[in-house]
Amino acid sequence: MLLDRKQYLGGYLLKDLKHLIYFENLLQEANNELVKQGKADGKRAIGYTCYFMPEVLLDLPGCFSVRLRAPGCTSPDIATYYLSGRVCHYARSLLERALEGGYNFLDAQMGTETCTATCRFQEHIQQKHLDSVEDMRIIDNDDFFCTFTDIPFKNTKNSYDHFETQLRAHVLEPLHEHFGIDVSDEAILKAIEEHNEVCRLINEIGEYRKLDNPTITGYEFHVIQLVSLCCPKYLILPYLRETAEEMKTREPNLKKEFRCKVVLAGSENDDPDFTKLVEGCGALVVCDRFCYGAVESRIPIELEEGKSPLRCIAEHYLKTSNCPRFMPQDEMRARKKRLADLAKEYHADGIIVASNKFCEYWSYERVIDTFILKRDYGIPVCSIEKEYINSASGQLRTRFQAFVESIEIKQIQEGN
């Protein structure tokens, strides 16, 4: 649902960004205007769901990446039949949207052996080529195929070797064989250059969130980050450049309209209205450490002498991830410290950790974060479990309002 321009943009009365309404419209469906333009330009649309699938490899010349979403899907009833009522709402919503024909524009889906629920979704959309399941041709595209890449659970040399081999076998080679995509080092370097420009622009815009009185809301930033994931890079870049330039002269409100600042962390979150809900309760979201957020996904890829571009990419995505599927004790402790450091860097007063219902990895992580961040770092934490599309906004609003009040009480007690 589009915002009323007279209403508070997540709580703010800042002058509207020039392209914000256009960005909001792009997020209304997966097959948006720029995706259609990319297809009309003769490029292949490659879907993915997980950070561990390097989007930079899906943006090679001749194709473009689309991180899948299912906006507005509130009742995934048919998908629940094929999956389960105890599978996370995100995976069921993706399958529901696929069954509705919402992903027929995809030429390929690059799956990852990470989240079991999204793996189930991707298994269902695979072309079966069996007489007994001809009725399960979910993606109505003769060229469509789906591959799965195995993702290591550790950051070691063997992990980097394995991941590099997997990316070559299950991403680069299929793209070349099916669509004739150039997968040479030169092509990969060109994709890295484009990817890093997107990262630079998103980070430049995100720096304004560190100001004492930020000149961008969490909602606005969430929208901008999402369009960078869901649209062809070469088509969205001009809008990002213009927005970054616009931010240089954007004036803050004379009066702070927020009551506290928070880091929003957790599992998959591609719903800007959730961020808007948080900010409507008086908590300005200044940092997004969740799946689909910018903290990790917009770290530029660094090239190292003596290493191939593919090797640099493999190491980059394993080293920068803060996914809870990495379970060694040192990795778990590092993730808690990372959140605490982000709260300090962005001058946040608290952290909201939100996990999707039935998300196995983040259900454990959320409980541990709630305890450790408060005990070891003295940071107030609000822990919630939510659905993919949040229909229970009243209950969430009550929780967030109470959290904001608790932070204000803490600040009064500390004499701030």
Image (cartoon, helix red, strand yellow):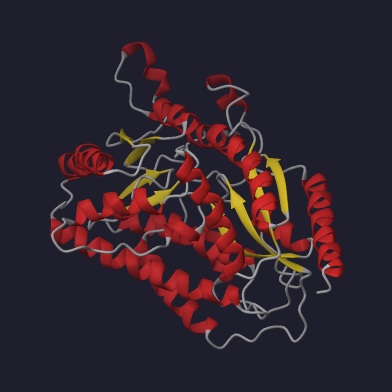
Q: Nearer the viewer, residue 403 or 227?
A: 403
Is 331 located above or below residue 276 in the figure?
Answer: above
The image quadrant where one finds the N terminus is: bottom right
Q: Position of residue 262 (x, y in %)?
A: 68, 62
Judge from the rendering whether residue 21 lies leftward or rightward of residue 115; answer left or right: right
Tell me which corner region of the image, top left, top right, bottom left or bottom right, holds residue 15: bottom right
Q: Position of residue 285 (x, y in %)?
A: 66, 63
Q: Position of residue 375 (x, y in %)?
A: 69, 50
Q: Position of residue 143 (x, y in %)?
A: 27, 37
| Residue sitting farthest toward the front | 376
Q: Residue at x 43, y 44 (%)?
A: 50
Is 110 located above or below residue 400 in the figure?
Answer: above
Q: Residue at x 45, y 57 (%)?
A: 296
Q: Residue at x 57, y 69 (%)?
A: 345
Q: Is residue 309 visible?
A: yes
The image quadrant where one finds the C terminus is: bottom right
Q: Residue at x 20, y 39 (%)?
A: 165
Judge from the rendering whether residue 106 lies leftward or rightward of residue 23; answer left or right: left
Tell me which corner region of the image, top left, top right, bottom left or bottom right, holds residue 129: top left
